[in-house]
Image (cartoon, rainbow, N blue to C red):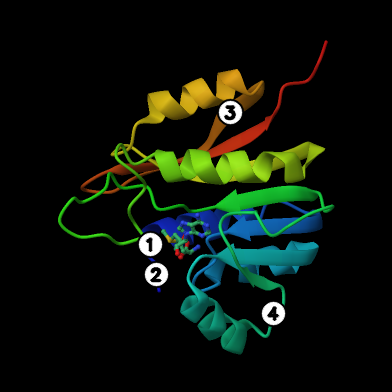
Amino acid sequence: MYFPSDDSIFLSDIVNQYHGQLALEVGTSSGIILKELSKNFRIAIGTDLDLNSLIHSQSILKNDNLICCDAASALHNVMFDLIVTNPPYLPNNPNHVDKTIDGGPSGIEVSIHILTSALDKLTKAGKILIVVSSLSNKKKLERFIVENNLVMKQIAKKNLFYESLEIMEISRKIKQ
Ligand SMILES: C[S@@+](CC[C@H](N)C(=O)[O-])C[C@H]1O[C@@H](n2cnc3c(N)ncnc32)[C@H](O)[C@@H]1O
């Protein structure tokens, strides 16, 4: 289980500004962000690979919309107004595997995997919020955005002593 940290609080403060019908959080773990989403969305669903952390958050949140699966893979025929994720974003540590923090060889691969899984569950006007670290390969993410006809803008930035974190908002490019 991932215990709420600076990144969790950073994202949970931002999701408060969004409202709608359906929201999805990928990588829910403790549920700190899902709890905030539940305040402004009619239905908030959380997914995580780690069943134990979902069982823990279910007992605290009393939210039954928790699914143990990879990214958004278990969700079909449902479209979300907002999809949020604080993904594992550190470059893999070759000596120790930790799926809560290891984001792939350059730190961004798991983020791109999550976005790929979530994209076809986003409404036309929907938004994705994702935490991106200065320690991961942002250029690779920017390429993914262009290749998928998306737009990405920075919503907030936080400097920590060892890295900086950005919250990026991703949406579909509006056709002219
Ligand atoms: C950095 S933690 C964030 C936890 C929590 N949302 C927070 O902000 O405190 C990342 C979470 O994503 C989960 N995760 C990693 N890869 C995943 C995947 N492919 N699908 C779903 N969840 C994943 C991990 O198990 C972990 O709970």
Among the 4 quarters of the image, the one containing residue 5:
bottom left
Cα–Cα span, label 3 and label 2 = 27 Å
Q: Mark 2 or mark 4, which has the lower sequence index?
A: 2
Kindly report the distance in space between the C-alpha atoms of the residues bearing marks 1 and 4. 21 Å
**Callout 3: helix, strand or loop?**
strand
SS under mark 1: loop
Residue 63 bears which disc, if any? 4
Nearest to N terminus: mark 2 or mark 1: 2
Q: Residue 26 location in percent, x, y?
A: 58, 57
Is residue 54 shown above or below 141?
Answer: below
Residue 2: image tag? 2
Comparing marks 1 and 3, which lies closer to the viewer? Answer: 1
**Spatial CA span between label 2 and label 1:** 6 Å
Q: Which of marks 3 and 2 is in front?
A: 2
Q: Establish whether ligand 1 lies closer than 8 Å to the Cβ of label 1.
A: yes
Q: In this view, does 145 lie above or below 63?
A: above
Is label 2 within 8 A of ligand 1 (CB to nearest ligand atom)? yes
Q: Can residue 167 be seen here? A: no
Q: Name the residue under label 3.
A: 152
Type of amino acid at the residue the image marks with label 4: Asn
* CA distance separating discs 4 and 3: 30 Å
Classify 10 Å Cα crowding around label 2: few (below 14), some (14-19), many (20 and above). some
Contact between marks 2 and 1 (CB within 8 A): the answer is yes
Q: Do the residues labelled 2 and 4 touch (CB within 8 Å)?
A: no
* Three-letter residue code for mark 1: Thr
Dot 2 falls on a residue whose secondary structure is loop
Report whether 90 appears left or right of 42: left
Q: Quadrant for the N terminus, please.
A: bottom left
Pointer 1: residues within 10 angstroms few (<14), some, or many (20+)? Answer: some
Sooner in the amino-acid sequence: mark 3 or mark 2: 2
Looking at this rendering, what residue extends furthest in the top direction? 176
**Circle 2 or circle 1, nearest the eye:** 1
